[in-house]
Amino acid sequence: MTGKKTKPVATAKISKDINSSNKEGDVAKKQLNSYTIRSRNSTAKHKFISTHGGGLVVNYQTGTTNWLKRLGNITIAGIVQDKADLDDPGKLVVEIGFGGGDVLVSQALSRPLDLFIGIEVYPTGIARVLKKIKDNNMTNVSLIQHDALEALRDMFEDDILDEIRVLFPDPWPKKKHHKRRLLKEDFVRTMVAKLKKGGVMHLATDWQEYAEEIMDVLTTIEKDKLIKNLFEGYADGRQMSRPITKFEQKGLNEGRQIYEFLFVKL
Ligand SMILES: C[S@@+](CC[C@H](N)C(=O)[O-])C[C@H]1O[C@@H](n2cnc3c(N)ncnc32)[C@H](O)[C@@H]1O
């Protein structure tokens, strides 16, 4: 850590590392989270993660970047290969709430010199991506199984990320649940703080009313001259090379429009 601090996120109240939590219910009971963990056969998933996650799944921790070492311009995490002799140090990319991991894995496969870190609480998603990492012998992906509000705030120094992505966060459509939404102003400001100058924030939702709320938050932060929209209004999704995600497909099947956001940090 460089000692730089970002504004604490008011809704982040979990104090226990979910990797060390035996029962998912422990976490769910404590607070109103932006997620609910539904996972069938979770004992098997946890067993799979603890057997195969060594070096790939990084435990939540505070006050240290030992897990994320910076060697000059080069960043390595977990078992990621030492890239010290490469001319291009590669980019550091974080995807939050990667779900089944289709985007995370496909981007990491197509950009082997960049380092991808996925943050997710869903054991099935973590186990799925771990399997894909193993099957493809990938060395440029690390996972954090923890609430992104805390993980991003506490495990990353400011001005370190080249890209940060949140695709189709849970929309929490009922008004009484809106407070559970992930992309609230405090958290978006934390994401901005973690980006380098010139770093890019990529968000998407298929929920119109959530899209409007996100745009309001981004416009407020843009007025502070911290970020700039790379598009006039919503981004043109056709310019993003990424697979369609599971939740995006669900939205499309149900006739919803996709709203995408691409902002750069100033
Ligand atoms: C609606 S799903 C979208 C998954 C994937 N991005 C897609 O488009 O298919 C939202 C995901 O975000 C995860 N999530 C929600 N809140 C989170 C949080 N605070 N920290 C980490 N992951 C979170 C959920 O577990 C879930 O897998």
Image (cartoon, helix red, strand yellow):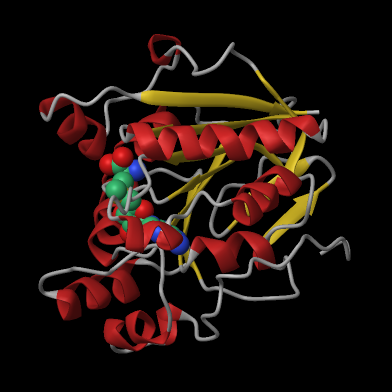
Q: Quadrant of the N terminus?
A: bottom right
Residue 220 horizontal/vertical position (percent): 70, 37
**Left/right of residue 11 with respect to residue 191 in the rendered view:** left
Task: Locate residue 257: give its quadrant.
Answer: top left
Above or below, comparing residue 131 to residue 84 in the picture: below
Residue 169 horizontal/vertical position (percent): 38, 47
- Residue at screen point 42% across, 79% down: 18
Above or below, comparing residue 219 to residue 4 in the picture: above
**Left/right of residue 129 with respect to residue 144 in the rendered view:** left
Task: Locate residue 121: give its quadrant.
Answer: bottom left
Residue 46 horizontal/vertical position (percent): 26, 76
Task: Locate residue 24: give its quadrant.
Answer: bottom left
Front-lying residue, 222 or 174: 174
- Residue at screen point 41% across, 74% down: 32
**Left/right of residue 83 with respect to residue 251 in the rendered view:** right
Residue 262 horizontal/vertical position (percent): 56, 24
Q: Residue furthest front?
A: 175
- Residue at screen point 73% across, 65% down: 65
The answer to whether one can see residue 97 in this image is yes
- Residue at screen point 33% across, 51% down: 170
Q: Quadrant of the C terminus?
A: top right
Front-lying residue, 84 or 220: 220
Front-lying residue, 152 or 105: 152
The answer to whether one can see residue 114 in this image is no
Above or below, comparing residue 190 to residue 247 in the picture: below
